[in-house]
Every structure is written in structure tokens, then in C-alpha cells.
Amino acid sequence: MKTPPIPANEKQRLHALQRYKILDTPFEKEYDDIVKLIAEICEVPFALISLIDSHRQWNKAMLGNIQQNVERNLTFCAHAINQNDLFVIEDALNDDRVADNPFVVNPPGVRFYAGKPLTTPDGYNIGTLCVIDTQPRKLNEKQKLALEVLANQVIKQLELRIKIRELESATLEIKHQSAVLQKQSKKLKALNETKDTLLAIISHDLRSPLNALTGLLSILEQNLISQEDFIFHTRLLKDKLNNLNNTLETLLHWASSQLKHTTTKAENIDLKVISQEIVDFLSDIAKNKNIVIKNNITNPAWAWADKNHMRLVLRNLISNAIKFTHEGGEITIWAEKNNHTLKVFVKDTGVGISPEKQKQLFSSFGIDKSTRGTKGESGTGLGLMLCKEFLEKNCGKIGFESQPGKGSTFFFTIPASC
């Protein structure tokens, strides 16, 4: 038996693992559903979500009679994290790395192993999603694809864990501020309204997508589906995770702006570059609705503004355009410079905005003001209010033109760089 090599980036890899604060936590349905699904797709009796720390393999989820803690040097997964591709041993007895491994020569008698490394967004392999059998075997292409897709979903769940923890921290900060401002009646009232709305949004806009994700996984788990259907459902999962991540980002920005005296860090920024970053980021969501995004900001468009604020503004405006445009529609982005001002436009061919909605578009928000998109997409109702707030902090303004059934054009002005 060969001892698994230690990755060259082991120190950074362990730091990346600890960031999730997942080790030794209870079993959770979201992860249990994934191992059940991959075991059914691959037709094996054992499946794991494993995490490799400095001395052991700890399993966050597992199907089959498997130890939750295993010495790292005895695990197949410790070999798998040394590569980025799918790691497969079709017959353990014919592989000198594991042929005399205790789990091979003793019960359960492992003969087959396939593990896809769980790779963090910054490139560290912290564990695997793996399947195991007591018989030699091979995976077909559909099964390999399933391992790759679901391993990515595990990382999405772990990243979501961090976002929720940050959001919970922001909520605690709100409660702290509430106690501090007990003697300031006007501020206290405003803060309590903010707190109640934030908690309601968390309950409505985070719980609903998570329930939908669980429902989709259940559908995948209970059916023997074709590869075409599998790809369709995984695209649904990806869309929901992207929408959920966008909701979390918006909530965190909003919570930060409400709780802190944030400063605006203006600098020379090129909105051509920033707009293309946002278009690329949202391209998958647009493609799923067959929406064409034309970014006509082809020349440098220099502005004097806070880069992060402009990213949020453009992301919200383009996301809204996708949300309210029917399949096969079109979104166009362009910019015009006039003396010392830069004006940016985002035009869609969507459903437009009713006169009643137009009157309250940038006013105080509520959950009932968050209109669902053309495919039922949800939101917080905070996006446009945040755009207005951040643009005003950068000496800018926002406006729009819209006709029901004929689409909308949102535009904003910002100081141009000299």
C-alpha cells in the first residue's frame, strides 16, 4: 500500500477547509440527498461526501455502512485530492496503491472507487464526492457527468453556508444596534422596521429557493432519468443557486449600508470592463432564457466612482432586465459621454412596468413589491433602492422609461473621469 502524498499547497488547503466550519457538524439533508442521488445514478451501495483534514478523513454525508472518521493515510480520497480530475480505481486488487489496504483485504472489501475532488472557488481540493462498490466496475459518461455536477453542487452548498453565516452576523448586528438606540425613538422605530423586513426577506427569499432545491433533488433521486433530463434539472439547480447567491449578495450589501457609515472610494474605473464582467457572469442565466445581451460599450468608458458600487448597480439592472424579459428577448447596453458626465443605458424587450408600479419603483420597499419574473424568478425588492442609494453616494442619478408590454430602459449618470 502506498501512503497518499501530501499536496504541495497543504497549508493553504487546510485553511480553505477550515473556512467552511463544517467539520464535526451534524448530518444535514442537503448533503444526504446528494449522496443518495449519486449512489442511485452510479448504481453502487456506497457514496460519501468526504473532507480531508491534517490527519483524518471525515464524512459529512454517507450512504452504506461506513466509518465517519478514518485515518487519512488509509483513505482512497487522500489520493484523489492530489488531482483535479475524476479519480477512478476500477479494481483495487490490481492497483498497487491500495491493493493491500485494510478496507480492500478486510470487510467491506472495496474493489471499485471513483471520486471527484471538491474544489473550492480558489482552487483547493478539500475532499471528494465519491462512490464505492465491492465489485470491479466502470462508469459510463452519464455517471461521470453526474459526479462532476453534484461535486460542484456540494461546493455551492458550502459557499452558501458562508454567505448565510455572514448574513446571520449582519442580523445580530442589527439586533445589537436596536439595543443601543433604545432611547432614540425615531431611530429605534426605523431600525425595528429594518430588522423585521430583513428577517421576513430571509424567511421568504432564502427559504423558498432552498425548498425548491430540495424538491428538485428529490425528483432526481426518485426517477431513472435520461441524460437530457438530467442536464435539464441540473441547469435548474444552477439557476436557482445563482439567483440565491445574487439575493444573498444584495442582502449583505443592503445590511452593510444600513448598519455602517460606509465610505465611497471613488477612483478611475472603466465601465466597459465592469459591464463585460457582469455580462459574462450572468450569461448562463440569459442563455437559459435564450436572451441575447448586446454590450455596445466597446470603447473605454471612464468614470470617477466606487468600483464595487458600480458593479452592484450594473448587476442589478442587467439581472432585472433578464428577469423581466421573455424567452428569445434582447437586452442592449450602451454608454454616452456628455461633457463631464457619463450616461449608461440598459434596455430590454421585456414586459414593461405598469404606471402604478412606476410611482413606487425607488421608494420604501416591501416584499410584496418584489414582482416575479417571466419564469417565476423571485427577488428581495431591494435592488433598485440600493442602486439609487449607491449612485447618489457617487454623485449620480438613476431614471427609467417604460411601457407595459414594450420593455424598459433604465439609465444612470455618473461623473466622467477627466
Image (cartoon, rainbow, N blue to C red):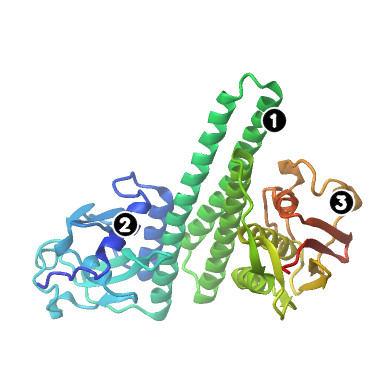
Total number of numbered labels? 3
Does any portion of residue 331 appear in the rendered image?
no
- The residue located at (20%, 68%) in the rendering is 6
Q: Quadrant of residue 323?
A: bottom right
- The residue located at (33%, 68%) in the rendering is 117
Identify the mark at residue 247; answer none if there is no mark.
none
Q: In this rendering, is residue 62 above or below 181?
A: below
Query: Element under label 3?
Result: helix
Q: Amino acid at mark 1?
A: Ala
Is mark 3 in CB contact (under 8 Å) with mark 2? no
Q: Which residue is mark 2?
A: 15
Residue 406, percent from left and from top: 88, 66
Identify the mark at residue 190; answer none if there is no mark.
1
Residue 321, percent from left and from top: 75, 64
Closer to us: 240 or 365: 365
State left or right for residue 69 relative to residue 153.
left
Q: Going from the N terminus, do you reach mark 3 or mark 2 first?
A: 2
Query: Element under label 1?
Result: helix
State left or right for residue 226 relative to residue 2.
right
**Whole-number angstrom distance, CA of label 1 to CA of label 3:** 24 Å
Mark 1: few/some/many CA within 10 Å (<14, 14-19, 20+): few
**Whole-number angstrom distance, CA of label 3 to CA of label 2:** 48 Å
Q: Amino acid at mark 2?
A: His
Identify the mark at residue 358; answer none if there is no mark.
3
State left or right for residue 287 relative to residue 160.
right
Which mark's residue is nearer the viewer, 1 or 3? 1
Closer to us: 329 or 13: 13
Closer to us: 111 or 201: 201
Residue 301, percent from left and from top: 72, 73
Residue 199, percent from left and from top: 60, 37
Is mark 1 in CB contact (under 8 Å) with mark 3? no
